[in-house]
Amino acid sequence: ENGNGERWAREFPEETRKILRVLSDSVIEYLDRQICNGADAVQVFESLGGTISAQTMLQFALPEMARISLALKERHPDVPCM
């Protein structure tokens, strides 16, 4: 276990998914506005990727990162999302 957040995610997985969904929705809207206002590309990364376990990354972070990327590609197919 790598900290309180990871323990909380393990103990409350559904609540964790709900929180991450809300955060991801905000990221999607924010990056959409950035693109609409002239960004040539956007980058999404997991800032805690080096501190959370691989299991937590696979279970919680990567699905939301994929959702963000897919939503932006649907809205802006020609804008690179890294």
Image (cartoon, rainbow, N blue to C red):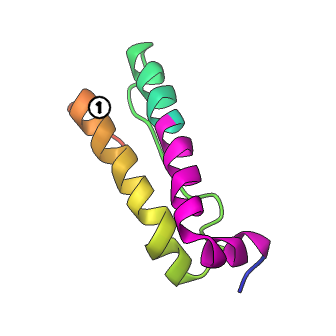
Q: Residue 52 lies in what quarter of the image?
A: bottom right
**Is residue 51 at least partly visible in the picture?**
no
In the rendered image of this protein, does residue 21 appear above or below residue 77? Answer: below
Q: Residue at x 40, y 22 (%)?
A: 35
Residue position for label 1: 79
Residue 21 in the image, given as x and y percentages of width and height: 49, 48
Q: How many other residues sit within 10 Å of disc 1, few (<14), some (14-19) or many (≥20)?
A: some
Q: Quadrant of residue 65?
A: bottom left
Residue 5 appearing in the image: yes
x and y, in percent, of residue 71 in the image: 31, 39
Residue 1 place in picture, x, y as percent: 71, 86
Magenta portion: prevailing SS class: helix
Q: Which residues are magenta?
A: 4-25
Residue 48 on the magenta segment: no
Q: Is residue 80 above or below residue 34?
A: below
Q: Horizontal placement of 50 versus 38: left or right?
A: right
Q: Which is more toward the observer, 1 or 37? A: 1
Q: Which residue is outermost to the bottom?
A: 1
Q: Position of residue 74 (x, y in %)?
A: 22, 34
